[in-house]
Amino acid sequence: KAGVTQTPRYLIKTRGQQVTLSCSPISGHRSVSWYQQTPGQGLQFLFEYFSETQRNKGNFPGRFSGRQFSNSRSEMNVSTLELGDSALYLCASSLGADNTGELFFGEGSRLTVL
Amino acid sequence: GQSLEQPSEVTAVEGAIVQINCTYQTSGFYGLSWYQQHDGGAPTFLSYNALDGLEETGRFSSFLSRSDSYGYLLLQELQMKDSASYFCAVRGGSSASKIIFGSGTRLSIRP
């Protein structure tokens, strides 16, 4: 069974632009979470979606937004990019039954902001 | 809010045993997970503890003490391929579906 797929894998943007990242979860998984990873900062929680509804949100500014579609695919958007937004953005899926801590991660989208 | 603390770096010798500790603070607690991430790779799930005690999976074991808000990951018979970053993650806070990660422990294995 296919794993979590994230596109694009790499992208370069300039300050002020916006970016949209896509995540296709494992078939049958209804929960999608997004994390930002920077060196030394671990994985910072962005948001979590389940059945097209945002269930949880991390402490990021409103420039960061997301959504989930009826097929469980998810997108996240960052507007008015800043240099500090350069990071690896990881998407993780799970069944969403909340009875285990197991997340399945994609390879990530590496964003560089110049 | 939620926070987790774990050592930033640990060095061990091939064939030895190493323990990576994790302490957490959260208003609501459902479980503690451990993930491994090799350089350039995606995090992969190792273990999950919802109840106190030790869970063993091959060379890896994970322990949880809810009363101490503490857990650890124990790696035995270390191999060079175990060189990676290890993250503890807590499921809890305001929602059972929210999983927050620590900053990670970089494990280096010496021959």
Image (spheres, rainbow, N blue to C red):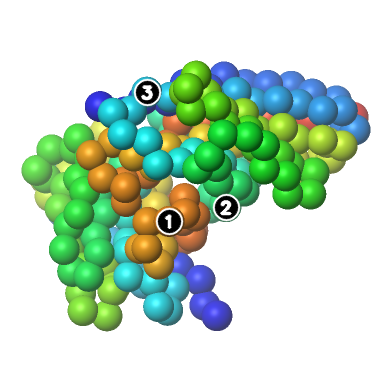
For discs 2 and 1, the disc positioned in front in the rendered view: 1
Q: Position of residue A76 (x, y in %)?
A: 22, 58
Image height of A30 relative to B54, above or below:
below
For discs 3 and 2, the disc positioned in front in the rendered view: 3
User: Residue B94 appears in which quarter of the rendering?
Assistant: top left
The chain holding disc 1 is A
Quadrant in the picture for the C terminus of chain B: top right
Callout 2, which amino acid?
A: Thr
Q: Nearer the viewer, residue B48 or A11?
A: B48
Q: Which residue is mark 1?
A: A99
In 3D space, how far apart are the residues under numbered discs 2 and 1 (Cα atoms)? 18 Å
Q: Which residue is mark 2?
A: B44
Q: Mark 2 Cα within 10 Å, few/some/many (few <14, many 20+)?
A: some
Quadrant in the picture for the N terminus of chain B: top left
For discs 1 and 3, the disc positioned in front in the rendered view: 1
Q: Which residue is mark 3?
A: B25
In 3D space, how far apart are the residues under numbered discs 3 and 2 (Cα atoms)? 23 Å
**Residue at figure coordinates x 74%, y 21% from the top left:** B11
User: Residue B38 appears in which quarter of the rendering?
Assistant: top right
Note whether residue B3 is visible: yes
Callout 3, which amino acid?
A: Gln
